[in-house]
Image (cartoon, grey):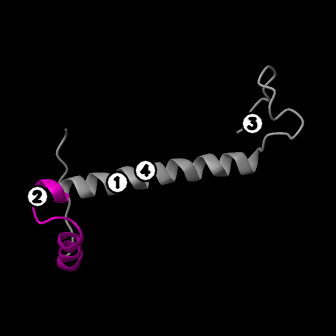
């Protein structure tokens, strides 16, 4: 794993210490999970936006033999 140094204000650090366990490794795991969750949510949001821009057609929705061309 690569180390990551972040700075945060005292209030945010105190809140983190309240919700995450007081041991450093557990606090680090809490932060890693929060980052993974944020990245995953951003990826899902981008996927939803792409489907909104070009939704699947109702006629060929289940027919994978002839996919529509995606236009970005």
Mark 1 vs mark 4, CA separation in Å: 6 Å
On screen, residue 39 versus residue 71, left or right, reads left
Q: Quadrant of the N terminus?
A: top left
Q: Position of residue 47 (x, y in %)?
A: 61, 46
**Residue at mark 1:** 35
On screen, residue 71 versus residue 30, left or right, reads right
Residue stretch in magenta: 10-27
**Residue at mark 2:** 24
Rendered residue at 79%/40% (across/down): 56
Position of 36 relative to 16 (above/below): above
- SS state under label 4: helix
| Nearest-to-viewer mark from 2 and 4 | 2
Mark 2 vs mark 1, CA separation in Å: 17 Å
User: Which mark, residue 39?
Assistant: 4
Rendered residue at 18%/76% (across/down): 14
Quick one: label 3 or label 1, which is nearer the N terminus? Answer: 1
Q: Position of residue 34 (x, y in %)?
A: 34, 57
């Amino acid at each position: 794993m690569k180390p990551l140094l972040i700075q945060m204000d005292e209030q945010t650090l105190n809140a983190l210490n309240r919700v995450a366990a007081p041991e450093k490794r557990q606090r680090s795991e809490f932060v890693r999970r929060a980052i993974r969750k944020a990245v995953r949510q951003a990826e899902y949001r981008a996927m939803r936006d792409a489907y909104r821009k070009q939704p699947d057609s109702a006629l060929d929705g289940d027919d994978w033999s002839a996919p529509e061309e995606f236009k970005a």
